[in-house]
Amino acid sequence: MANLKRLAALGAACFAFAPIASAEAGEAGTGMASWYQLPGRTACGARNNPEAMTAAHRSLPCGTRIRVTNLSNGRSAVVTVTDRGPFVRGRIVDVSRGAARHIGLIQRGVGRVQIARL
């Protein structure tokens, strides 16, 4: 029983993320994005594929599709939320290496983006 309580507390702690303003379809948020490449599985249970069009977001449900637009060049990509993060203050989304390449974020590593839930 004690293990169940600890597990429940751990689960609640892992998913206690603040919601963003762009929770409804079509609404947008603007902020900094970065790209990441980690081995293993994502927080949503999928195997991590760095070339897939995926992203990490703090509060959007797993499987949510969002459009990420790089504001410095206007390039955009539709990605699927498969992980939790970013865990760096001031960033609103982490995209996979493949998505970062598509929107031109690879060289700088970070950039100002707009996200819109589809």
Image: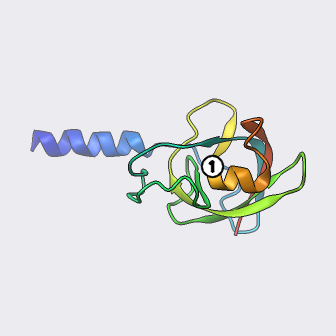
Residue displayed at 58% across by 49% down: 57
Q: Amino acid at mark 1?
A: Arg
Residue at image mark 1:
97
The quarter of the picture where residue 80 lies is bottom right
x 64%, y 62%: residue? 79
Residue drawn 42% across the image and 50% down it: 43
Name the quadrant of the C terminus: bottom right
In the rendered view, would you say 97 is above or below 24? above
- Give x and y (percent) for residue 91: 68, 37
Q: Of residues 31 and 21, which is closer to you in this image? A: 31
- Taking the spot 56% from the left edge, 46% from the top edge, the residue there is 58
Q: Is residue 32 above or below residue 104?
A: above
The residue most toward the left is 1
Q: How is the image coloured?
A: rainbow
Question: In the image, residue 98 lies at what x, y percent?
Answer: 64, 55
Q: Within 10 Å of the Cα at label 1, are there few (<14), some (14-19), or many (20+) other Cα atoms?
A: many
Q: Secondary structure at mark 1?
A: helix
Q: Which quarter of the image is occupied by the N terminus?
A: top left
User: Residue 67, image x and y in percent?
Assistant: 73, 62
Viewer-nearest residue: 49 or 57: 49
Q: Where is residue 24? Give x, y as percent.
A: 68, 65
> In which image quadrant can residue 54 be found?
bottom right
User: Furthest-right residue in view?
Assistant: 73
Total marks placed? 1
**Horizontal side, residue 12 vs residue 115: left or right:** left
**Residue 81 as seen in the image, left or right of residue 22:** left
